[in-house]
Amino acid sequence: MRNILLLILVATIPLMSVAQKRSKKGSNAKMDKMVKKTPSDYEYMIIEGVQSTTSDEEKMMGQGELAARDGAPGDAKMKGMIKSKYKHFIRFDTGRVTPEQVELNKMARVCSHMSDALYQASKLGWEFVNASHANTDDYITHFYYMKRKRSSDK
């Protein structure tokens, strides 16, 4: 048994040493060269808005009043949601802090709805691309994806 193990060890040592040898620097091994890419022609921004699904009025209601409201016809519920008594918190994110982003986030404090945020961004040349949202029991988070042509002076 020892002779067999010794024979296997002696036979595999040359194979292991060949596998670990380094290649010569002048070899034909093709490596990808680093290419410096130019920035995109567009700048991108995400407008994130968090909307409360319960108004301050609903938070102060008792369980009986809420149960009566839940039993109301669908039209009454929809009209109540359209009246926009719900709080919104909005944030603009361009991926880096610029004076324009700081100014947009100051304006976001007075935006009462996501459409206000879209309007403020469109005044600065941002174009709406897409939107998505995520729901939880207490909040709806809206994501608006925006782009604009990158200015040449940057």
Image (tube, rainbow, N blue to C red):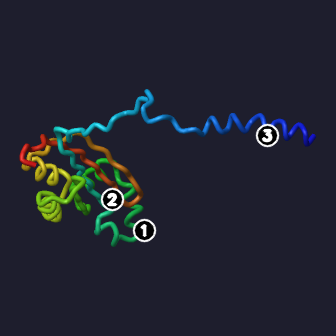
Which label is found at residue 152? none
Residue 91 in picture, x, y percent from top left:
23, 59
Residue 51 or residue 124, whichever sits in front: 124
Which residue was labeled with disc 2? 53
Q: Is residue 100 visible?
A: yes
Residue 46 or residue 5, whichever sits in front: 5
Quarter holding the N terminus?
top right
The amino acid pointed to by label 3 is Leu
Callout 2: 10 Å neighbours few (<14), some, many (20+)?
some
Foreground disc of the pair 2, 3: 3
Q: Are marks 2 and 1 in contact (CB under 8 Å)?
A: no
Q: Quadrant of residue 149?
A: top left
Sequence-earlier tag: 2 or 3: 3
* Residue plotted at (25% across, 62% down): 89
Which residue was labeled with disc 3? 9
Residue 87 in picture, x, y percent from top left:
25, 63
Callout 1: 10 Å neighbours few (<14), some, many (20+)?
few
* Residue plotted at (17% across, 61% down): 105
In this view, which residue lies farthest toward the right?
1
Question: Considering the numbered disc 3 on the image, is that residue within a helix, a strand or a loop?
Answer: helix
Residue 142 or residue 9, whichever sits in front: 9
Q: Quadrant of residue 101?
A: bottom left
The amino acid pointed to by label 2 is Thr
* Residue plotted at (84% across, 36% down): 7
Q: Are marks 2 and 3 in contact (CB under 8 Å)?
A: no
Sequence-earlier tag: 3 or 1: 3
> How many labels, in total?
3
Q: Is residue 111 visible?
A: no
Which residue was labeled with disc 1? 63
Mark 2 and mark 3: Cα distance apart in space = 71 Å
Foreground disc of the pair 3, 1: 3
Mark 2 and mark 1: Cα distance apart in space = 16 Å
